[in-house]
Image (tube, rainbow, N blue to C red):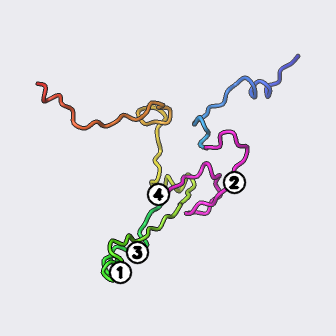
Amino acid sequence: FVISKAFFFYFVSKMVVKRRNHGRAKNNRGHVNFIRCDNCARCCPKDKAIKRFHVRNMVESAAVRDIEEASEIKDYQLPKLYIKIQYCVSCAIHSHIVRVRAAEGPGGRKDRAPPKRFRGKSNNNAKK
């Protein structure tokens, strides 16, 4: 019984994995649909794309006061514009929507601890 090199490397050696989920949220699905990046139109899997909701007023801030004065309804809330923006990883990093994280250290990819909560000013000076 002869073990070939291909068999050895395929089953015995383990490839280095950068991320536990391979940068995707596919979990147990075999295939997900592709979306087009809103910035560069690159095809990107829907679960890998970086998605953000961009909420803006329908009217620019200069015209809001004019519309409020001309409106018959008091305390009328102007509607907002909700835009879902989907980026590929390259465009999201380039436009600073997401940041590159180191593997080790606080806030890194391999840091599984929840982030520390900010509890305000400490009272160490008051006790002294």
Task: Find numbered disc 4 in the image and state the secondary structure of the residue it sits on.
Answer: loop
Q: Which residue is mark 3?
A: 59
Please report contact status of discs 1 and 4: CB closer than 8 Å, yes or no: no
Question: Is-magenta flag for residue 35?
Answer: yes
Q: Amino acid at mark 3?
A: Val
Mark identifier at residue 33: 2
Q: Nearer the viewer, residue 44 or 14?
A: 44
Q: Which residue is mark 4?
A: 95
Range drawn in magenta: 25-53
Magenta region, main secondary structure: loop
Please report contact status of discs 3 and 2: CB closer than 8 Å, yes or no: no
Question: Is-magenta flag for residue 65?
Answer: no
Mark with earlier residue (2, 1): 2
Q: CA distance from mark 3 to mark 1?
A: 14 Å
Q: Measured from the top left, where is residue 71 in percent x and y?
A: 35, 80
Q: Is residue 26 left or right of residue 124?
A: right
Task: Find numbered disc 1 in the image and state the secondary structure of the residue it sits on.
Answer: loop
Q: CA distance from mark 3 to mark 2?
A: 34 Å
